[in-house]
């Protein structure tokens, strides 16, 4: 069950602020509060989806398209489309997901390290 009190739900309801990069009908992108690279932005769907399992099973085609297109737009806005970047989604317990609202991380602005740290 989706927890409407998670921090990203509060950001979407504008109950707490965010450093917004991009917004459209289906998505919101904002800077991560604890950046792990020179550029670290989160892209989230506006719909209430816990994780990729939930999104893949229950989102509409428009919502899925909107989120994927937003990822590309945000990379362009951040100026990393050519230099390269990493997008990453932590999913569930083993994936290390802390906030139970689906989000993609976008990292860039520098050469990134190994793909997986344990
Ligand atoms: P995850 O481990 O994938 O769930 O990552 C959650 C991310 O949300 C972490 O990188 C946090 O730094 C980030 N985060 C938590 N609260 C906020 C906030 N209020 N604004 C921006 N980013 C946040």
Image: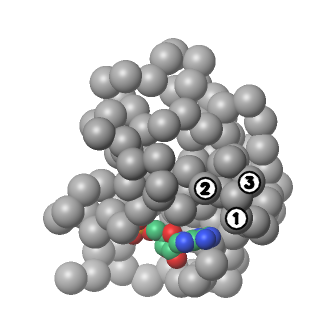
Q: Is residue 100 above or below residue 62?
A: below
User: Which residue matches tag 1?
Assistant: 16
- Describe the element under mark 2 as helix, strand or loop: helix
Query: In the rendered view, does 19 fall on the left or right side of 106?
Result: right
Query: Horizontal and vertical percent for residue 45?
Result: 57, 40
Which label is found at residue 14? 3
CB of mark 2 near ligand 1 (< 8 Å): yes
Disc 3 and disc 1 in contact, CB within 8 angstroms = yes
Where, by quadrant of the figure, is residue 113 drawn?
bottom left
Distance between the alpha carbons at the discs numbered 1 and 2:
6 Å
Residue at the (43%, 38%) spot, across then down: 49
Residue at the (24%, 56%) spot, across then down: 92
Q: Residue furthest left?
A: 94
Q: Is residue 14 above or below residue 107?
A: above
Disc 1 and disc 2 in contact, CB within 8 angstroms = yes
User: Which residue matches tag 2?
Assistant: 10
Where, by quadrant of the figure, is residue 38 drawn?
bottom right
């Amino acid at each position: 069950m989706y927890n409407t009190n998670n921090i990203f739900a509060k950001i979407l309801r504008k109950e707490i602020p965010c450093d917004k990069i991009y917004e459209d009908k289906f998505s919101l992108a904002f800077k991560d509060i604890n950046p792990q690279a020179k550029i670290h932005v989160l892209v989230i769907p506006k719909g209430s989806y816990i994780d990729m399992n939930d999104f893949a099973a229950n989102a509409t085609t428009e919502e899925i398209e909107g989120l994927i297109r937003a990822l590309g737009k945000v990379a362009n806005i951040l100026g990393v489309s050519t230099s390269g970047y990493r997008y990453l989604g932590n999913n569930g317990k083993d994936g290390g997901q802390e906030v139970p609202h689906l989000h993609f991380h976008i990292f860039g602005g520098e050469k990134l390290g190994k793909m997986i740290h344990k």
